[in-house]
Amino acid sequence: MKHRVVVVGAGFAGLQLVQDLAGADCAITLIDQRNHHLFQPLLYQVATTLLATSEIAWPIRRVLRGRPEVVTLLARVTGVDRDAGQVVLDNGDRIPFDTLVLATGARHAYFGHDEWEADAPGLKTLEDATTIRRHLLLAFERAELAHDPAERDANLTFAIIGGGPTGVELAGIVADLAHRVLPREFRRIDTRTARIMLIEAGPRVLPVFPQGLSDYAAAALQRRGVQVLTGQPVTGISARDVTIGESPVPCRTVIWAAGVQASPAAEWLGAPADRAGRVMVDAHLTLPGDPRILVLGDTAHVEADGKPVPGLAPAAKQQGRYAAALIKARLAGKPFPKPFRYVHQGNLATIGRNAAVIDLGRIRMTGWLAWWIWGIAHVYFLIGVRSRLAVAISWLWSFLSRQNPARLITQKDTARRR
């Protein structure tokens, strides 16, 4: 019987591993609770009307249609029976494994205030993105209908919580939407009066970037009309307002980009985890004391140079490649490869049209050139020629026409109705 590899999660790490195991003498079962692989770095562009969902997501079965040794299951994992060597699914099925790879990603973290999620959706899935897009567009429509100036202003107030790359990128495009795209389309309101707040509890935005790039990003956002509030934690969120420190601000649209927590993989395994819930793994990305189990991506606590490896797509893909090499060595009866070594490829963030920051270590860039390099890099990492062309054409159309093409209000709210 062939060696049975079960992979839970079809994100960057899990899919990279499955692709790199092509030709290996093993039977692979890939389990995910969604039927698509998602390019998360561009998810915020779906939320802010720049891209359609089909441009950044691909059906898993289509991606792996040429791999007969891979069985894909649309299911939710509820546990792992390590003694029996089985993965437990929500329908009661048990999938046996010889090697288990957990790459289940991360979810939103509300720092002990899970009740905020209903009024401040985060951005991790396509459902999150379309929900946020709906909220954004409906806010302008409700402002157009409002007769009370206070209600109109509340609908035109947008709070984005978290000053990391996701928060900065969201704030920049929401500002472009309000100030550049929509002004000629509304008659009773001036969308340029919208108040966009980027709220960061720490001392500066983009804290993983050098101080100079962080300062550039804050200044670029302010030039676009974004109110950058640093050193001011959010203490309350409701359907009517957001409380910054002790001051409530009437606001109907709040977006959470402040923190993440790992999936419950550590609970499934009964394994030690860090404060964010990430499983503590050894230098080979395996569970200490149980080399059958590998943990990758946002699910794993991996250190490089004494610091945790960041939760970035390149890091997850590197772990997927390493794990595939380790499994191949195991199947061939060879020694494990050298311990995993993360190679940092830099940090990139876009602030809006013709503005971005790039930190490649010794090379640091800002402005329009950084913006073009950021775009080229993201198009390159998309799956397939069709997706690269579709995204490039959407961006080119938006750049030339100053319009965002994906501005349809569809579906019902997946979060609580306001």
Image (tube, rainbow, N blue to C red):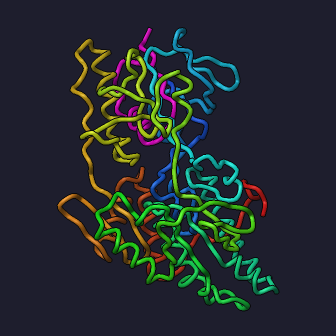
In the current view of this chain or complex, which residue is farthest to the right? 147
Please indicate whether residue 24 sits to the left or right of residue 335 in the image: right
Q: Position of residue 271 (x, y in %)?
A: 48, 23
Instruction: Please say whether residue 339 is one of the residues in the magenta stretch.
Output: no
Q: Position of residue 251 (x, y in %)?
A: 68, 72
Q: How many marks?
A: 0
Q: Which of the image's four quarters has the C terminus?
A: bottom right
Visible residue check, residue 69: no
- Specify the quadrant of the image occupied by residue 34: top right
**Camera-side residue of 103 and 201:** 201
- Specify the quadrant of the image occupied by residue 74: top right
Please indicate whether residue 408 sits to the left or right of residue 65 in the image: right
Look at 40% across and 25% down and name the residue there.
294
Please indicate whether residue 408 sits to the left or right of residue 295 in the image: right
Please indicate whether residue 237 sits to the left or right of residue 48 in the image: right
What range of the chain is rendered magenta?
1-26
Instruction: Please say whether residue 25 is one of the residues in the magenta stretch.
Output: yes
- Specify the quadrant of the image occupied by residue 218: bottom left
Where 81 sits versus 279, above or below?
above
In the current view of this chain or complex, which residue is farthest to the left? 362
Q: Position of residue 68 (x, y in %)?
A: 47, 27
**Camera-side residue of 410 and 225:** 225
Q: Which of the image's four quarters has the N terminus?
A: top left
Q: Position of residue 247 (x, y in %)?
A: 64, 71
Where 141 sits versus 7, above or below?
below
Look at 27% across and 32% down and name the residue there.
340
Visible residue check, residue 316: yes
Look at 40% across and 68% down and name the residue there.
350
Look at 34% across and 42% down and name the residue there.
309
